[in-house]
Amino acid sequence: MPAKKSAILISIGAEATLEKKEMFGKEVLVKTRVPKGYRNPALDAKLRKERTLREARMLHSVKKMGIISPVLYLVDSHSASIYMEYVDAPRLKHVLLNSKIKTSEKMRLCREFGQLIARLHAQHTIHGDLTTSNVLVRKKETKNELVLIDFGLSTNSHKIEDAAVDLVNLKKTFSATHSTLEKGWDEVQKGYLENGGKKDILTHVDKVESRIRYA
């Protein structure tokens, strides 16, 4: 294990804490799954270890798909911690809400997000928490690029239903948070289809929404 240094607490979530540390000569993000007092200690340790290892595997596998995501440095299964690249970039959510950014650039990012999701789904990988908060917009010399983060709920599935639910969650984000961004969701769908996303999945999104609405 690397020597511990002072850490900056970034967030405390229901499942994990995020800290920024100086390690390996660079800034590192440490995600640690917190113990749950209501669970049997042995079971809790087992679950946190399994979920940590699963997330690390997902983080590694999406890299092989050509999807930009944080670089994985180290996994400590005993403390249920993942050490990964700290990406100093705003969330897509905040970029889309920023009135100073051109609408054309926002549309390009939405379309690129759709393309990214299509690549993910083509490999039967379900993100599990697709929102504009789980994508970072990193500045590059030529154009901004999207960095997909937070694979804590990710799974592998060949089911159209699971891919559709993934997209339903994202569509809800556009309806609730980006309702003033006209055609934002349309651009996501265009990017999805033009990069190999299945039309059947987008059609199934409507079916899932109907079930939720009338449940």
Image: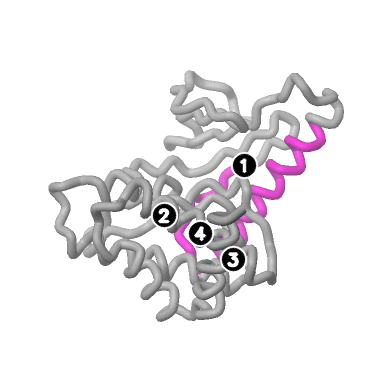
Separation of residues labelled 3 and 1 (CA atoms): 29 Å
Q: Is residue 21 visible?
A: no
Type of the residue with mark 4: Val
**Disc 2 or 4, which lies upstream in sequence?**
2
Asked if the residues shown at circle 4 and circle 3 are in contact, with their CB atoms under 8 angstroms apart, the answer is: no
Against 28, residue 62 (above or below) is below
Type of the residue with mark 2: Val
Tell me which segment is drawn in magenta. 45-73
Regarding mark 2 in the picture, which secondary structure is present there?
Answer: strand
In the picture provided, is 22 more to the left or to the right than 165?
A: left
Type of the residue with mark 1: Leu
Tell me where residue 195 appears, x and y as whole percent. 44, 78
Against 77, residue 55 (above or below) is below
Asked if the residues shown at circle 2 and circle 3 are in contact, with their CB atoms under 8 angstroms apart, the answer is: no
Which label number is shown at residue 168? 4
Residue at (69, 71) in percent of width and height: 158
**Disc 1 or 2, which lies upstream in sequence?**
1
Judged by depth in the image, the label closer to the viewer, 4 or 3, is: 4
Which label number is shown at residue 82? none
Q: In which quarter of the image is the N terminus?
A: top right
- Give the labeled residue for mark 2: 147
Is residue 19 within the magenta segment?
A: no
